[in-house]
Amino acid sequence: MSTPSRDDCVALDRDDPLASFRDDFVLPAGVTYLDGNSLGALPKTAEERMQNAIRQQWGQGLIRSWNDAGWINLPTKLGDKIAPMIGVGAGEVIVADSTSVNLFKLLIAALRLNSDRRTILMEARDFPTDLYIAQGVADLMGEDYECRMVPTDEILAALDESVAVLALTHVNFKTGAMHDMAGLTKRAHSVGARTIWDLCHTAGAMPIDLAAAKADFALGCTYKYLNGGPGAPAFVYIPTAQQPTFHQPLTGWMGHAQPFSFVDDYHPAGDIKRFLSGTPNILSLVALEASLDVWAQVDLNLLRAKSMALGDLFIELVEARCAGHGFILASPRDATARGSQVSFRHEEGYAIMQALIARGVIGDFRAPDIVRFGFTPLYTRYVDVWHAAEVLYDIMATRAWDTPAFRTRAAVT
Amino acid sequence: MSTPSRDDCVALDRDDPLASFRDDFVLPAGVTYLDGNSLGALPKTAEERMQNAIRQQWGQGLIRSWNDAGWINLPTKLGDKIAPMIGVGAGEVIVADSTSVNLFKLLIAALRLNSDRRTILMEARDFPTDLYIAQGVADLMGEDYECRMVPTDEILAALDESVAVLALTHVNFKTGAMHDMAGLTKRAHSVGARTIWDLCHTAGAMPIDLAAAKADFALGCTYKYLNGGPGAPAFVYIPTAQQPTFHQPLTGWMGHAQPFSFVDDYHPAGDIKRFLSGTPNILSLVALEASLDVWAQVDLNLLRAKSMALGDLFIELVEARCAGHGFILASPRDATARGSQVSFRHEEGYAIMQALIARGVIGDFRAPDIVRFGFTPLYTRYVDVWHAAEVLYDIMATRAWDTPAFRTRAAVT
């Protein structure tokens, strides 16, 4: 059987129940964007909302907008909009700070709940900031603490009664390989360990049911699939039942029970606001809300089905068209074990990706040898996938990647 | 001698060498804004810059803008723009996270430099987030650590060889009282303590010479006098000489020596970038840069002279016009000992401030009894000060504040 043609892909797009969401995003002409798993596309309403936030709320409302425009409530209001996407309830999610800062807070809160244990268990080759933050936490907590990083296939065996907390990214940033969240959480709980799930590559890529998985805590960024804008703040999940015993160390005024009483002693808020530290960044929250209001209309089961189909199609096309050109699939072939990305290893991956970008097909490179393609089903079409595979074939067939210009590394890869 | 008249103030404005900067800011019609020390006014160029950042850099450039639009360099680029305002050099200031998060990082780095000591010395009634964060740090570091909060007049006596770090806000948020930064730093160093200066109410209010004061570390927000927008990120000063031994615990990927090598082990950047944790919030940095480019044109000595004159004028007018109405000056009468604000105590302060705001004179209230007026010399005129005092007089003379509506507390005061 032959691989799908461009016409086949056009037909798939015509029948795609999510097709209309593409109109909610700005996509540059001449670009096939397969990097929404690094920076999501711009929601069309974000510019107008930001203009209103700047011109009216900041410019005219000034300090009054903390009350009148509801700025003070944005961290919880946006959290409540993310909650149904990850299978949890209102009052259990809050938006604040960065993934890195939030993981620090979660790790220390989790260690305090398991204060007789000293090990943070993590996966080697997880996203670096997770590993680095955990190393920083272990350093800070004392010589007997350890950030133990093990290969993927040793995680289960390493889950023993020395482990205070298991902190894992649900979908690996390089390979797209997905962990069994419910299974690992259950195993962690069976040895008395807490779990922290990093959903940076999951939220907005598929439905998640944190409550069903009994995850203790979770967090994720909002600038990938959630389209919150460059460096948008991150979200955190703390189940209602855990909130009274949740004690994070970055005890800033916004987490106080009565921040505007200006008393000298810290008393944490009784609810999820105790997770907050400093003054929330309002402009970035405004941009994020524009995207979350699109997400509120999305059926995440349809999203997941399309995500898997797009990935399967790309693997099929690349393996057919680029056979013999040295690509090795780095992602799970089974779509149910994969996030919303497909990665290949190639020793010339960096130059190949630069050649693709020069031709308007934007994925990204992850050292040392991964070319990575993200499929964001709200605005990625089947024809985009077909086109990307065709351009990749052409670049390989003509060795267009093989120039010094494409080998010169940029500051951000 | 009679108090200055409105005509006198008009004349002062006419001769004000900073008068033209008012045109660089948006100020709502009918409003006399004396709360730029809580949220600075909108720089006129911010909206257009944000539109460009959203429409072009995010919308069209997408992930490429990390390199092409220089997003990755914004934290240091903006730090370098703040550096001359606080008397330090390029490469010694960086913009990131919030004041709260940054103070946490600085405190732990400072404690690590003084690892045989256990006391953080602070001023009682300093801004709550500073006190709360220090309490959180002391809790985290262990039972023998202490966040010691002493009254202002006991700080010198409390500076003994048990103190690891003295952390003070240079200008008090409620009273505007200013510490002798050089003197206290010298005394701290004489007993082997490090110093952290919070410049939230100083940066953009007067010239600062951190280097001359030999301050060890400093930080400050950018949404007050620096006009960076609601919840804009904060800045941090780490002298070049201290950078190699500066070890903060929030070791996220942006502080790594090679963040895009994606290796598993953390190695801090050799320069001030080691202060960074997570991905920088680009949109908020863009808004801040609009203001910093105005600041680059400002003579801070002229700014300070006008700031003192505005404050002196307000005290004179209020004490003359509102005599007998129960106001007690809470700020230093001596302008050289005062930041760029004037506060009065009044038992009905909350209702009085609400009445002022209803009349378009916006200051703020700080519990339990402070009415606070900030003077931001880039856009506050002498006639604004005159008008504010007149409206205050009218409100007191007519008891316009004495209604239940003005006594109803809002979420944010």
Image (cartoon, coloured by chain):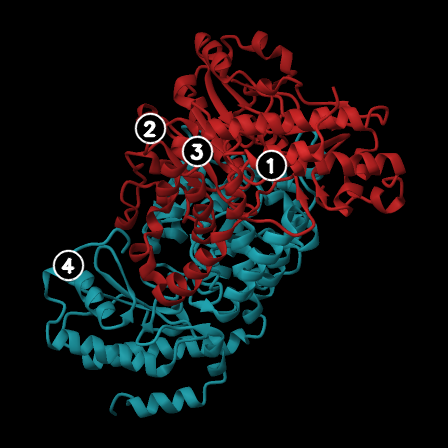
Chain colours: A red, B cyan
Q: Is A39 placed above or below A90 here?
A: below
Q: Which label is found at residue A37? A: 1
Q: CA distance from mark 2 to mark 4?
A: 33 Å
Whether tag 3 and tag 2 are in contact, CB under 8 A, the answer is no
Which numbered tag is attached to residue A243? 2
Q: Amino acid at mark 1?
A: Asn
Image-based side of B21 in relation to B245, left or right: left
The span from disc 3 to disc 2 (Cα, nearest Å) is 12 Å
**Relative vertical location of residue B44 with respect to residue A69 in this rendering, above or below:** below
Q: Nearer the viewer, residue B116 or A409?
A: A409
Residue B211 located left or right of residue A52: right
Q: Nearer the viewer, residue A213 or B155?
A: A213
Element type at mark 1: loop
Kind of residue at disc 3: Val
Residue B75 vertical placement versus A116 (above, below): below
**For numbered disc 3, what is the local secondary structure?**
strand
CB within 8 Å, label 4 to label 1 = no
Q: Are marks 1 and 3 on the same chain?
A: yes
Same chain, labels 4 and 1: no
Q: Quadrant of residue B91?
A: bottom right
- Residue visible at 47% across and 20% down? A195
